[in-house]
Every structure is written in structure tokens, then in C-alpha cells.
Amino acid sequence: MKYGIALFPTKKLQDLANSFRMRYDSHYALIPPHITVKEPFEISDDNLPYITSKLRDIAKSSSPVEIDVYKVDTFSPQSNTIFFKIKEHETLSELYAKLHQEPFEENTKYKFIPHVTIGQDLSNDEVADVVGRLKMKKIEHHEVIDRMQLLYQLENGSWTVYETYRLGE
């Protein structure tokens, strides 16, 4: 089964992200606004108890994560994804690093760019138009996230929480 690990921000930031996602994100109905800290990966049913045990250990040894959203950006031209960019904070970088070492695979496909997606699967012209307008808006948000979630993907492509881990307990 396919799993992933994410941080869900507060309702305030989710509401702000969703105000854009409703119009610009083709995955709006599949998962709430989130920060991906571990890209989707496969776990067999036999290995799931071991992985959840490791995640509990990682959560206990990790501090709550500070995030500062400070602008709108895009991955264009590699991807027509629009997002709220998050400043890299030591607490977030450390959690990310722990989730990319044994027993987890290292992410070699992409550099870690902390973000909350607000738009995807748009045309090049739409991305340029939307990003141009949103870069003029002042976006500032700070919060501390004290939980991470192990998610699994359902047959319809949506994601749901399998287990929540409190950071720093």
C-alpha cells in the first residue's frame, strides 16, 4: 500500500490555502493542505508495525516544527505547481532528515523545498497569471506544528490519516 508522511497546519493556514486550492488545485478533494515531509512510498502489511514503531521513535526525538510562510512561488518550468513557500527552519529540516535515513529511503529525486501547495495541473499561461497576481499579495504566517501524520492512499486517489504522532513527547 502507498503511504506518505505530512504535517497539517492550523485551520487558519488551511483556510487560506483552500481559498486558492478550490480554484487552482486539481487535488483539492483528495487531501487537505499539508507539508509533505516524506514523499509517497510503499509499505507491506508485514512491515507496517516496524515502520510505525520507528515513526513513534522519530516523533519522540523530534521537536515541534516551526513554519514561516512568507511568499507565493512556483516550481515552473519543472512543474506547474503553485505554493506557499516556507522558510527552512532547523526543526523542519531535522525532522525531514530523520525521515530520509534508515529504515526509510533517501529522497534523491527532489531537493526539499518546504511548501503548501495551492495550485497544480494548470497551463503555463494560468501559472504565469496566477503567480503574477499572488506575488503582489503579502503572505505572512507563523505557527508551530506539534504532530505528524502517516497517511495512506485510498483506491480513489484520496489520502487519509493512518496514525498521528505527537512531536517531542
Image (cartoon, rainbow, N blue to C red):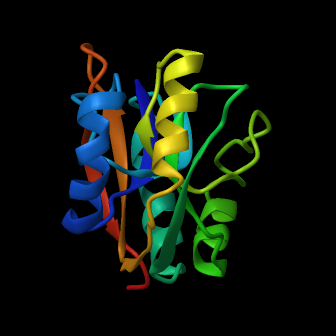
The answer, for residue 18, to whether it is visible in the render is yes
The total of numbered circles placed on residues is 0
Q: Is residue 50 above or below residue 156?
A: below
Specify the quadrant of the image occupied by residue 148: bottom left
Rendered residue at 63%/61% (across/down) = 96
Q: Is residue 117 above or below residue 155?
A: below
Q: Nearer the viewer, residue 18 or 162?
A: 18
Which percent across, then down, holds residue 124? 59, 18
Quadrant, the C terminus: bottom left
Which percent across, then down, holds residue 61? 54, 80
Specify the quadrant of the image occupied by residue 160: top left
Q: Nearer the viewer, residue 143 or 169?
A: 143
Rendered residue at 34%/66% (across/down) = 165
Rendered residue at 72%/26% (across/down) = 77
Which percent across, then down, holds residue 162? 27, 45
The answer, for residue 41, to whether it is visible in the render is no
Rendered residue at 27%/30% (across/down) = 23
Which percent across, then down, holds residue 120? 46, 27
Quadrant, the N terminus: top left
Tell me if 161 is positioned left or right of 152 in this view.
Answer: left
Q: Is residue 38 above or below residue 110?
A: below
Tell me if 57 is positioned left or right of 89 in this view.
Answer: left
